[in-house]
Image (cartoon, rainbow, N blue to C red):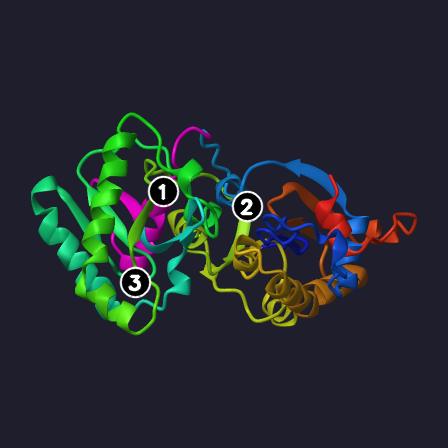
Amino acid sequence: MSVGPLRLSLLVPRLLGPLPGMDLKGFPAPNCPALNKLLARANRITKTGTADALRYTLFNYALPDHQDRPDGWLSYQIDTGAVPNGVVLRADPVHLRADQHRLVLFAADQLTITPEEAQALAESFNQLYAADAMQLEAPTPTRWYLRLTESPALRTTPLTQIIGRDIDKHLPTGTNAQHWRRFSNEVQMLFHEHPVNRAREARGKPLINSLWLWGGGKPVSPVAQTWQRIWTADIVTQGLARLNSLRCSEPPEDAANWLAQVVGDEHLLTIETVQNPVAYADVEDWYAAVENLELRWFAPLLSALGQGRLRELRLLPANGQEYRVTRWDLLRLWRPVRPLPNVALSK
């Protein structure tokens, strides 16, 4: 069987920001000459949609924007090894913090939830709602699921898009939105008085005081794929790979290790390390994350392009653009290389 040239699509959500409420023009640029060169020499192609939507597009799914995607259905199978019956939504534990006139959401990866805490809260939930044909499952401390017998008729916002932000403009909409907003308030009251949270409060830890419902879209079927292998730690991307019978591994620590494992053909690799610094508007962590990627990924990939080891790099920061660069594109010396904040803020 012949092997085609090595091509990599690299999805790095929020690599280029923007950081909410931050004007990077007053900050020194991160030290990332390889990334700056790749961006300057690349062909720009419009690639609209959030990272959550782009994952499906990369797997050849054209799903309507006005409906939820089946994130819950896909990730449930990775977390449990079972295909769920009925409707399943992600119901992730979160901390809502009052900030002046708004409620800001902090995701579970900031809360250090133990498996015992997760199971205790899920058990109390299931006792309260036993007669309502719904069940809360917590197969991991950070990813929980709400099982239903009927569709909730909701349009929700993926968790990645609401982290660090005011929840008010992102609450569920749809035919039964008011019912589910009341439900969320009931859950907040249940969790607020729960012994788990009383113990967390005594230890000075943030409360697990709400659930964020999202990703309850209808299941999808396998479609034609060209990927030779998927490299990702993202649970939904892993679900899409499994659905389509594609080899899937977590990314190695750097591009050198990745290049040592691959031969050719089309590869999709995702890196999620930049998302949280951007979501929480942490400039220092964003700089550190970008410079780490420069050292571990962008510099080696630029070298691999120049040497002909890598035929093409498609960089996808989920900012509405795809940056596609080949060895020959690197010869466009007339294109100015700009510091990253200028690139991130440019239209």
User: Looking at the rendering, which quadrant does residue 286 occupy?
Assistant: bottom right
Dot 3 or dot 1: first in sequence order is: 3
> What kind of element bears circle 1?
loop
User: Which amino acid lies under the numbered mark 2 shown in the image of this protein?
Assistant: Thr
Residue 37: x and y in percent read 80, 56
Q: Is residue 206 visible?
A: yes
Q: Amino acid at mark 3?
A: Thr
Between disc 2 and disc 3, the foreground one is 3
* Quarter-of-image position of residue 134: top left
- Residue in the foreground of this view, choosing between 111 and 202: 202
Residue at the right extreme?
A: 334
Specify whether residue 308 is in view: no
Residue behind mark 2: 226
| Disc 1 + disc 2, Cβ < 8 Å | no
Q: Is residue 113 left or right of residue 56?
A: left
Instruction: Write down the residue under mark 3.
Output: 140
* Range drawn in magenta: 65-91
Residue 315 at x, y percent in the picture: 66, 51
Residue 160 in picture, x, y percent from top left? 46, 49
Which class describes the residues within 10 Å of circle 1: few (<14), some (14-19), or many (20+)?
Answer: many
Quadrant in which the N terminus appears: bottom right
Mark 2 Cα-neighbour bin, 10 Å: few <14, some 14–19, many ≥20: few
Residue under numbered circle 1: 215
Question: Residue, x 62% and y 63% (percent of image)?
Answer: 263
Between 255 and 127, which is closer to the camera in this rendering?
Answer: 127
The local crowd at label 3, few if under 14, some if 14 to 19, many if 20 or more residues have their Cα within 10 Å, is some
Residue 191, placed above or below residue 297: above
Q: Residue at x 47, y 61 (%)?
A: 233
In the depicted structure, whether residue 203 falls above or below residue 286:
below
Element carrying mark 2: loop
Q: Based on the picture, tell me whether residue 90 belongs to the magenta stretch.
A: yes
Is 216 in the magenta?
no
